Image (tube, helix red, strand yellow):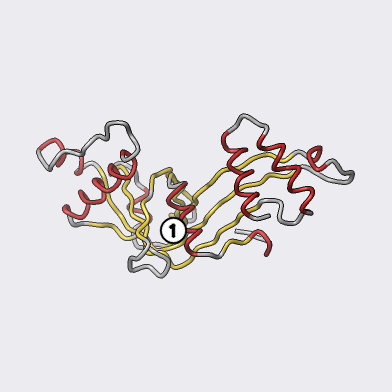
């Protein structure tokens, strides 16, 4: 990912936080010279065997990507909030539009998990993560014929991470006064992503 020095985020804790906050990822792999991608929720084990942690996930067995990607290096893209930045917000001449955003690229080799107990554990962890803030969290049933049949229709995998790239493009290349005007403009908008970008910009003033 092309990243100018002042936009680069290298703090492992912040990269991990972003992966967990924006965990619906785009998983990209290659087969026979062609690129393919799937959109999947991925869990992060921070203190796992990968140098930068390990991603856990699953996809439908009918999806051919898992067969093509098994044992290969893959890229998982985590897209955070983003917002269009109008040059009118700078209140200065000779400025141009841009886009502020947060993104993390995670690289590693995809490994298929064959053990049925481990596969069910990944499913259970996934349910727990995404149900935890529900008013009445749905508990995944204990293994029975129904659950086993569902588990047979998916393929679980892990990706020990060997490289992480983070890009926090938040107007760091502009003056403090300009950034404060952009923050005010973003906070005045109704979109949640705009206000989230404003908050991230404020953290870096």
- Residue 37 point in image, percent of width and height: 45, 47
Residue nearer the viewer, 38 or 8: 8
Residue in view at x 64 percent, y 40 percent: 83
Badge 1 marks a residue whose secondary structure is strand
Residue in view at x 44 percent, y 50 percent: 27
The C terminus, quarter of image:
bottom right
Name the image quarter holding residue 74: bottom left
- Residue 79 point in image, percent of width and height: 53, 47
Q: Is residue 10 above or below residue 124?
A: below
Q: Is residue 53 above or below residue 184?
A: below
- Residue 23 point in image, percent of width and height: 43, 47
Residue wearing tag 1: 74
Name the image quarter holding residue 152: top left
- What residue occupies the far left of the structure in this picture? 144
Residue in view at x 68 percent, y 32 percent: 188
104 sits left or right of 136 in the view: right
């Amino acid at each position: 990912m092309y990243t100018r020095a002042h936009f680069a985020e290298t703090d492992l804790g912040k990269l991990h936080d972003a992966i967990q906050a924006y965990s619906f990822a785009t998983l990209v792999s290659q087969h026979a010279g062609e690129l393919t991608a799937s959109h999947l929720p991925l869990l992060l084990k921070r203190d796992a065997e990968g140098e930068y942690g390990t991603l856990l996930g699953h996809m439908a067995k009918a999806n051919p990507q898992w067969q093509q990607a098994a044992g290969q290096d893959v890229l998982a893209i985590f897209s955070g909030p983003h917002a269009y930045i109008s040059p009118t917000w700078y209140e200065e001449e000779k400025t141009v539009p841009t886009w502020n955003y947060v993104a993390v690229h995670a690289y590693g080799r995809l490994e298929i998990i064959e053990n049925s107990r481990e596969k069910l554990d990944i499913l259970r962890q996934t349910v727990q993560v995404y149900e935890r803030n529900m008013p009445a969290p749905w508990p995944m049933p204990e293994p029975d014929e129904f659950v086993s049949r569902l588990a047979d229709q998916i393929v679980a995998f892990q990706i020990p991470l060997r490289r992480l790239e983070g890009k926090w493009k938040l107007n760091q290349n502009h003056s403090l006064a300009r950034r404060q005007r952009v923050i005010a403009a973003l906070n005045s908008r109704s979109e949640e992503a705009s206000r989230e970008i404003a908050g991230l910009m404020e953290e870096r003033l």
